[in-house]
Amino acid sequence: MLAAVQISKSFVGVPALSNVDVEVRPSEVVGLIGENGAGKSTLMRVLAGTHRPDSGSLTLDAKPLRLRNARDAAVHGIGMVFQEQSLLLNLSVAENVYFGQEAQFARFGIVNWRRMNLAARRQLEKIGVDIDVTTRTSELTFAARQMVELAKALTLEESTQRQLVILLDEPTSMLGQADIETLFARVRALKARASFVFVSHRLEEVLKISDRVYVMKDGRVVAEHAADAVTAPRLHEIMVGRGLQSEYYKEMKQESPGAEVLLETSNLGVARIFRNVDLKLHAGEVVGIAGVVGSGREEVTRCVGGFLPQTNGMLSVAGVPTRIVSPGQAVKAGIGYVPRERRVEGLVMFLSIAINITLANLDCVMSHGVIDYRRERNLAVDWIRRLRIKAPSPDIACRNLSGGNQQKVVLARWMNAGSRILVLDHPTRGLDVGAKEEVYELVRELSAQGKGILLISDTLEETIGLAHTVLVMRDGEITARFDASRGRKPDQVELLRHMV
């Protein structure tokens, strides 16, 4: 139905796609996997019309297809659901579903909101979702907004007589398991009227929902398999060139923490969010905080990072009582914060790698009150080498890096700033298995250097695997503590008893 033929695309002289061939057949789900930087997102944007290929061609129903922009793609029934979501949170659900298509509901320049709301309700009914279409989108959960994104893509049926192609770019990266199952149920129900291209780093999910799977590496398609004829370990091996290591979380490198207490809290709280949080973080220790959404764990880390000022209790850094009311104060106290939304909070995407690395410690590159750009560049070259950041130059803007390499730049910033305490807020979110392994290796190296790490993660398995100590939170309070030292890791079921 839709085919990419010998597609190539480069950015600033760096090849992103090289002679890629991919095809989508009627009423199927095509999985697309690969390491960060493999070219998946670039290919999706070529199919969606937001990138033009340097060479190669697209065909639709065996006829040549030339896409100048996303509107051209929409006219031909090709829509995209973005990982970061494209909804405007200050608008209603109905306004988002028909954003850019309001003219069909307007007469003499006045929009008939009743007609738009009814039409939006019909789109949501297609996917079996009951959401008040007059609700402001900011009031919805992330999972509900994902359903609105899907309904928005389905409006393309009104402008074409052909079956749709819906591109799903990491749609599950921020969803819980129940929400993932709901999304998959919707996709299966819609296969009669649409085909899907599904991008995800979670190999088990790809195999569960897909009919066929393409594997990309270094901008090329290196394998194609029927989903029922390949295993997740085999896909991992094709992606990264080696098998999935049994020592995935580098537990054998987990050393005992030191005696020095880098961070301590007593009865720490933020009114109406969390309370009575007592924790100690020693030098070389990884303290993982487990809990469901709304348990308060994210808010605890943001409080330590200075984004959410405490209202109760005590916090001390290296034995010195400290009241952190801003991120700037946290940085001065030696606390580095690696946020889950690295593109929004972690990096200045249009600035270079070198500038992003030195942002938290400009003193190291200052000379007589002026930034020494040669020193800054040399320093960045050293961090690129030490953290194995894949980039042709320290002058490349961070927006041109893969997710895994962007995360390394954020870590390099805090290591360069000399932070002894690191708050890692979902550090592997959106990363492929190979990039995750590299982050795990870095966590062990930082721990061995005596850094204290406060960790919250996407999975219990990751939290347990990396931590020395696991704290469990529920309803804003710590409900249990577990020793997770090497060889004594707690069972996930034990943690779950105290989480729900």
Image (tube, grey):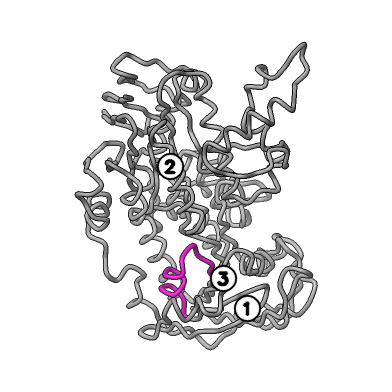
Q: Is residue 110 above or below residue 189?
A: above
Q: Nearer the observer, disc 2 or disc 3?
A: 2
Determine the residue positioned at 51% across, 54% down: 179
- As drawn, is 53 to the left or to the right of 244? right
Q: Nearer the viewer, residue 333 or 33?
A: 33
Determine the residue positioned at 38% across, 47% down: 36
Mark 3: which amino acid? Gly
> Which numbered disc flags the more N-terminal residue, 2 or 1?
2
Q: Secondary structure at mark 3?
A: loop
Mark 1: which amino acid? Leu
Would you name the residue on which mark 1 appears? 263
Q: Which labelled disc corresponds to residue 291?
A: 3
Pick the quarter of the image with the N terminus: top left
Q: Nearer the observer, disc 3 or disc 1?
A: 3
Q: Give the image quarter of residue 441.
A: bottom left
Q: Nearer the observer, disc 2 or disc 1?
A: 2
Q: Nearer the viewer, residue 458 or 408?
A: 458
Mark 2: which amino acid? Val
Image x and y of residue 233, in percent: 25, 58
Rate crowding at label 3 as few (under 14), some (14 to 19) or many (20 or more) other CA atoms within 10 Å.
many
Image x and y of residue 59, in percent: 32, 19
- Extreme-top residue of the structure: 108
Q: Which residues are magenta?
A: 454-468
Pick the quarter of the image with the C terminus: bottom right
Q: Specify whether residue 459 is painted magenta.
A: yes
How much space separates mark 2 and mark 3, taking CA atoms? 29 Å
Q: Is residue 56 above or below residue 136?
A: above
Would you name the residue on which mark 2 appears? 187
Rate crowding at label 2 as few (under 14), some (14 to 19) or many (20 or more) other CA atoms within 10 Å.
many
